[in-house]
């Protein structure tokens, strides 16, 4: 798989660590993600943050839907998200 051994910017590791630290929250808003990426220690503009987000999604580290209803949330806990969908389907 070409993603696994791919060279990426070191700062992506900082973003990944910050997101792992936030995992207990289950999700973050896209706005908060951009703020995290713009932090002086990281210094990403929105386009760079989007590349990083896309990469982490490709690896399965998080779930992000580029959909008008869900595009404002980045889900950090896939199990929590799956459980929510399962409960939703059972109720309906």
Image (cartoon, rainbow, N blue to C red):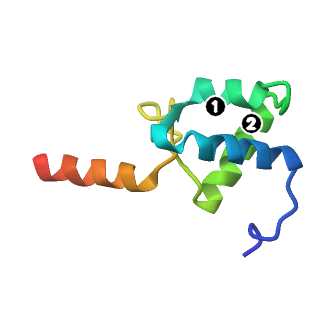
- The percent position of residue 65, horizontal first and vertical second, equals 50, 43
Q: Secondary structure at mark 1?
A: helix
Gap between marks 1 and 2, in whole Å? 8 Å
Disc 2 target residue:
49
Left or right of 82? Residue 13 is right
- Towards the viewer: 61 or 69: 61
> Of discs 1 and 2, which sits in the foreground?
1
Kindly indicate whether the residue at mark 2 contacts the one at mark 1 (C-beta within 8 angstroms). yes
Q: Is residue 21 above or below residue 71?
A: below
What residue is at 46 percent from the left and 50 percent from the top? Answer: 77
Q: Which mark is residue 81?
A: none
Left or right of 69? Residue 43 is right
Q: Secondary structure at mark 2?
A: helix
- Towards the viewer: 50 or 81: 81
Disc 1 target residue:
33
Characterize the local packing of mark 1: few (<14), some (14-19) or many (20 or more) Cα atoms within 10 angstroms: many
- Towards the viewer: 80 or 49: 80
What residue is at 63 percent from the left and 58 percent from the top? Answer: 58
- The percent position of residue 43, horizontal first and vertical second, equals 85, 29
Q: Quick one: label 1 or label 2, which is nearer the N terminus?
A: 1
| Image quarter (top left, top right, bottom left or bottom right) of the N terminus | bottom right
Residue lying at the far left of the rendered structure: 91
Characterize the local packing of mark 2: few (<14), some (14-19) or many (20 or more) Cα atoms within 10 angstroms: many
- The percent position of residue 28, horizontal first and vertical second, equals 53, 33
What residue is at 61 percent from the left and 25 percent from the top? Answer: 32
Would residue 92 be visible to someone looking at this image?
A: no
């Amino acid at each position: 798989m070409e993603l696994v051994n791919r060279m990426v910017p070191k700062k992506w590791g900082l973003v990944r660590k910050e997101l792992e630290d936030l995992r207990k929250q289950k999700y973050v808003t896209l706005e908060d993600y951009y703020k995290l990426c713009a932090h002086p220690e990281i210094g990403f503009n929105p386009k760079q943050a989007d590349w990083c987000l896309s990469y982490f999604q490709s690896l399965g580290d998080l779930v992000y839907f580029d959909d008008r209803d869900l595009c404002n949330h980045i889900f950090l806990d896939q199990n929590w998200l799956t459980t929510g969908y399962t409960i939703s389907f059972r109720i309906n």
